[in-house]
Amino acid sequence: MEEAVVLVKRGARHAGVPCPANATIGREAELVEIGALLARPDVRLLTLAGPGGAGKTRLAHEAARAAADHFPGGAVHVTLDGTEDAGVLVAEAAAALDVVAATADQLAEQLRLATNGAPALLVLDGFERFIDDAWQVGRLLAAAENLKLLISSRAPLRITAEHVYPVRPLAAGHAAQLFVARVTAARPDREIDDACVEAICARLDGLPLAIELAADRARLLPLPALLAGLEDRLALLTHGPRDLPARQRSLRATLDWSWDALDDAERTLLGRMTVFEGGASLEALEAVCDPGVEPLLSAILDKASLLQSDVNTDGQPRFGMLDTIREFAAERATVTDAARRHAHWFLDYCERAAEAAAREHRRDQLQRLALERGNLRLAFEWHLRHGTPDDALRIAIAFARALPWDAHVHEVRSWLAGALAAKPSENVPAALYWDGRLALSQAAFAEAAKRLGAATRAAQEAGDAALEAAALVAHGRCAALVRRADAAPLCERALLAARAVGDPGLIGDALFALASAYERVRDWDRVERLSAEALIPYRAAGDPYGAAAALAELGWFDLVHGRIELAEERFAEAVALRERHGDDRRLVEPLINYAWLAFARRTAEEARVQFLECLSRAQHMDDRFTIAEALGGLSAVAALEARWSEAARLAGASAAVQERTGAPAWESVVDEVERGLAEAREALGPHAFTSEFEAGHARGEDEAHQ
């Protein structure tokens, strides 16, 4: 007993629950959840588990203080910092509660006497050093039925009574609030730039400790200089406030303990895992880091919270780490062979996923590819650095084939350009074709025409009839979009090539492109007939996107001819096909038809909301052609409600976007918009109309938000 008392005096610090020195920011929801768990009778042991620097200690303090009234027997805090000796947990708790005990059973008996059996809360902070003694907690809970424990630890205790509450980094908005509050407290005159703050917090992974340390450095460094210094965040984030415990005065010191808790095999695995970005599936980890990694992953999760585990969209486990931890582990690892295996595995994975997305389960494959974008980029860059541009190009083409057509387009086009610049010997025609397709999706029509023309010639020289036909079809569609005089002949040639290849999906694309060309010359009968004809091979090919496009086009002509109910049926089927199979870019096309349907029914507010939704989606995807149409639709709605000035300004904004892209609106859309503008011109008069139109033209798409 005497020895235990000596250890208490030398090691832990214990007292009533400490009051934080400043405001706790961004943890309101977590505190509510933790409070609810502490209030449950079946929760005897609650462990706040998370990586070093996640803010577990502050959460434990705040939660215990908030719950103190529910524990008439007392709420007491014990800091286990600095206590390295195993087997002293009972002594620490006993001293904090002002009782004397050497065993869990003795402590339980003393608690009954000291608290008169009233509920009591014991907070143990920094338990990770005592994981091997966790069994004593189980004994204590079994013997003291009035006791509840709140523990902060980098690793769960893994005993029967435990309920684990994962402590995660702060969300972006809360991280920024914390950083700004701490910076302005120390330097009220410091200029705050929101974009810079957002970038700083992103570099810090939202870890509260890292944010506090960075804010402390902002006493001396302007925010742009601080952001630049965070390229080596582990070196920068040192010498924190003097009143912090030693383990919290530098980010590296916090992570050192977790690293030291691992054995050699676990450190080797963690080091190899740094070749992944954004995490990895178990399948990828076993291929890149060695088979049979599950026991080591479990051990790392149990010991140090250096890893994060989640579930992929396919229900399989996924493991990753914060970038801060990844940088720390990478400093201590040799990953040359792992990086090579990573690059080759993701080349194979990307091609398999692209092939699967072309056949079935497109939504699932798109989600997985989007999740692996960071890993694909690393694999692409590895192949370029190591002199294998053909393999780099294969990755770029595969991702382009199954691209989730949104914000990734710019990046993948840069991959294609980088690989082509490295002079690959294979797949150049396909690369030109896909770059042209992606340029077309961005409404970069001049670039698209150049690339697709080059792809057609290269495919012809290579004797690849299928690729030549595909490039011709895309080139014909591009020509129709910009109203080129040769659009119809080019599309006729593309249709002949597609029929020669015999691919029903490609035939559908060619028919649809030809329909677009005839719309430019207002040959409405041919447009409707070709759209109906395109639907047949699309259905035969099992192409939901092509079928949806054809249905939307047929529905549009039903709409302009007054067949409202039939139009709605076709639009509904088109949207259902797109939603079921994914791909937001292609979903926006039938959705804008729904907006026109609401307009045709003269339900102005519904139409306005739907056009704004389409505008938002199109802006997210940088789809300039649809942005222009949505602005035109908003102009028509404004005219419907006799808001003549607004109608003129929105028409000007739509015209500005069309001029920048080089693609005028479809003729049938022009007719709908012009009907409203004719009334606006008459109501405003020529001079006022022109003035409002030019004002909207100057503001462009921003006019929609005025």
Image: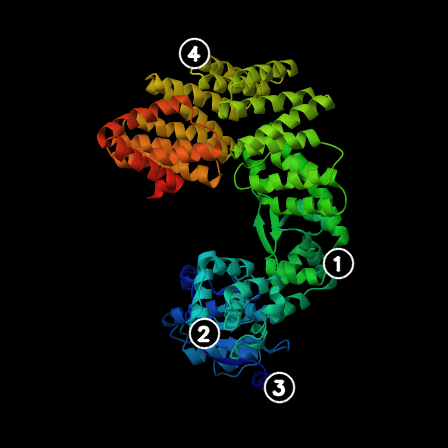
Residue sitting nearer the eye, 236 or 13: 236
Which residue is pictured at 51% across the width and 33% down the height? 443
Q: Secondary structure at mark 2?
A: helix
Task: Name the residue tied to disc 2.
Answer: 186
Picture layout, residue 222 above or below residue 283: below
Residue 3 is tagged as: 3
The crowd level at tag 3 (other Cα within 10 Å; few <14, some 14-19, many 20+) is few
| Foreground label between 1 and 4 | 4
Figure quadrant of residue 427: top right
Amino acid found under the numbered disc labelled 3: Glu
Categorize mark 1 by other alpha carbons within 10 Å: few (<14), some (14-19), many (20+).
some
Q: Left of 657 or right of it: where is 231?
A: right
Amino acid at pointer 4: Asp
Alpha-carbon distance for marks 2 and 4? 72 Å
Instruction: State the image quarter where residue 471 is shown.
Output: top right
The quarter of the image holding the N terminus is bottom right
The location of residue 608, given as percent across then percent down, is 32, 35
Residue 168 visible to an observer of this rendering? no
